[in-house]
Amino acid sequence: MNIIDENGKRLGILSRNEALRLAQSKNLDLLQVNPDSSKIITCKIVDYKKILKDQQLKNQNEENLIKGSKELTFGGKIAINDLMIKVEDPSPAT
Protein backbone atom coordinates (compact mmCIF):
# COMPACT_ATOMS: atom_id res chain seq x y z
CA MET A 1 0.00 0.00 0.00
CA ASN A 2 1.20 3.47 -0.88
CA ILE A 3 0.63 5.65 2.21
CA ILE A 4 0.15 9.42 2.44
CA ASP A 5 0.14 11.08 5.87
CA GLU A 6 -2.28 13.73 7.16
CA ASN A 7 -0.05 16.53 5.83
CA GLY A 8 0.07 15.12 2.30
CA LYS A 9 3.60 13.75 2.62
CA ARG A 10 4.20 10.41 0.89
CA LEU A 11 5.43 7.85 3.40
CA GLY A 12 6.11 5.14 0.84
CA ILE A 13 4.90 1.59 0.48
CA LEU A 14 3.92 -0.06 3.76
CA SER A 15 2.06 -3.22 4.63
CA ARG A 16 -1.58 -2.95 5.65
CA ASN A 17 -0.78 -3.76 9.29
CA GLU A 18 2.01 -1.17 9.45
CA ALA A 19 -0.26 1.49 7.93
CA LEU A 20 -3.07 0.72 10.37
CA ARG A 21 -0.67 0.76 13.31
CA LEU A 22 0.71 4.14 12.18
CA ALA A 23 -2.79 5.61 11.82
CA GLN A 24 -3.88 4.29 15.20
CA SER A 25 -0.79 5.70 16.88
CA LYS A 26 -1.86 9.17 15.66
CA ASN A 27 -5.51 8.54 16.62
CA LEU A 28 -6.49 8.87 12.96
CA ASP A 29 -8.08 6.66 10.32
CA LEU A 30 -6.71 4.96 7.21
CA LEU A 31 -8.77 5.90 4.14
CA GLN A 32 -8.36 4.22 0.74
CA VAL A 33 -8.37 6.98 -1.89
CA ASN A 34 -8.34 4.90 -5.08
CA PRO A 35 -10.69 1.95 -4.49
CA ASP A 36 -11.06 1.00 -8.19
CA SER A 37 -7.38 0.95 -9.04
CA SER A 38 -5.80 -2.30 -10.17
CA LYS A 39 -2.36 -0.85 -9.42
CA ILE A 40 -0.91 -0.24 -5.99
CA ILE A 41 -3.58 0.77 -3.49
CA THR A 42 -3.16 4.31 -2.17
CA CYS A 43 -4.35 5.13 1.34
CA LYS A 44 -4.30 8.37 3.28
CA ILE A 45 -4.11 8.86 7.03
CA VAL A 46 -6.94 11.26 7.90
CA ASP A 47 -9.44 12.22 10.59
CA TYR A 48 -12.54 10.64 9.05
CA LYS A 49 -14.92 12.28 11.53
CA LYS A 50 -13.66 15.69 10.41
CA ILE A 51 -14.23 14.76 6.75
CA LEU A 52 -17.80 13.70 7.53
CA LYS A 53 -18.48 16.95 9.43
CA ASP A 54 -17.09 19.00 6.54
CA GLN A 55 -19.29 17.13 4.05
CA GLN A 56 -22.38 17.62 6.22
CA LEU A 57 -21.64 21.33 6.56
CA LYS A 58 -21.13 21.63 2.81
CA ASN A 59 -24.42 19.83 2.15
CA GLN A 60 -26.25 22.10 4.61
CA ASN A 61 -24.80 25.19 2.91
CA GLU A 62 -25.87 23.88 -0.50
CA GLU A 63 -29.38 23.16 0.80
CA ASN A 64 -29.62 26.67 2.21
CA LEU A 65 -28.59 28.13 -1.14
CA ILE A 66 -31.15 26.00 -2.96
CA LYS A 67 -33.96 27.04 -0.64
CA GLY A 68 -33.17 30.66 -1.38
CA SER A 69 -35.02 32.08 1.61
CA LYS A 70 -34.56 35.79 2.12
CA GLU A 71 -35.40 38.08 4.99
CA LEU A 72 -37.21 41.33 4.25
CA THR A 73 -37.33 44.25 6.64
CA PHE A 74 -39.66 47.23 6.33
CA GLY A 75 -41.41 49.74 8.52
CA GLY A 76 -45.05 49.74 9.58
CA LYS A 77 -46.01 52.65 7.33
CA ILE A 78 -44.87 51.13 4.02
CA ALA A 79 -47.09 51.71 0.99
CA ILE A 80 -48.54 48.69 -0.82
CA ASN A 81 -46.66 49.54 -4.02
CA ASP A 82 -43.34 49.72 -2.13
CA LEU A 83 -44.10 46.39 -0.42
CA MET A 84 -44.82 44.70 -3.75
CA ILE A 85 -41.55 46.01 -5.19
CA LYS A 86 -39.63 44.58 -2.21
CA VAL A 87 -41.35 41.20 -2.58
CA GLU A 88 -40.62 40.98 -6.31
CA ASP A 89 -36.98 42.14 -6.03
CA PRO A 90 -35.64 41.68 -2.48
CA SER A 91 -32.14 42.91 -3.36
CA PRO A 92 -31.06 45.95 -1.33
CA ALA A 93 -31.65 49.35 -2.90
CA THR A 94 -28.54 51.28 -3.88
Image (spheres, helix red, strand yellow):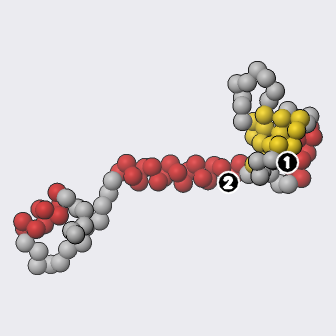
State left or right for residue 6 relative to residue 16: left
Seen at 39% across and 52% down, the residue is 65
**Quarter in which the N terminus is drawn:** top right
Give the x, y percent position of residue 47. 74, 51
Seen at 78% across and 38% down, the residue is 43
Q: Is residue 30 above or below residue 47?
A: above
Residue wearing tag 2: 50
Label 2: how many Cα within 10 Å (few below 14, some 14–19, many 20+): few
Q: Which picture quadrant has residue 92? A: bottom left
Secondary element type, mark 2: helix
The residue type indicated by label 1 comes to Ala
State left or right for residue 58 relative to residue 30: left
Give the x, y percent position of residue 57. 54, 54
Seen at 24% across and 72% down, the residue is 73
In the foreground, 24 or 8: 8
Give the x, y percent position of residue 93. 21, 68
Secondary element type, mark 1: helix
**Quarter in which the C terminus is drawn:** bottom left
Q: Tell which circle, 1 or 2, labels the residue nearer the N-terminal end.
A: 1
Seen at 72% across and 29% down, the residue is 35
User: Looking at the rendered structure, which numbered label has been put on residue 23?
Assistant: 1
Q: Residue furthest top?
A: 38
State the count of labels. 2
State left or right for residue 11 relative to residue 38: right
The residues tagged by marks 1 and 2 sit, at their Cα atoms, a distance apart of: 15 Å
- Given contact means CB atoms under 8 Å apart, are the residues at marks 1 and 2 in contact? no
Give the x, y percent position of residue 3. 83, 39
Residue 11 showing in the rendered view: yes
Label 1: how many Cα within 10 Å (few below 14, some 14–19, many 20+): many
Residue 29 showing in the rendered view: no
Q: Is residue 84 above or below residue 22?
A: below
The residue type indicated by label 2 comes to Lys
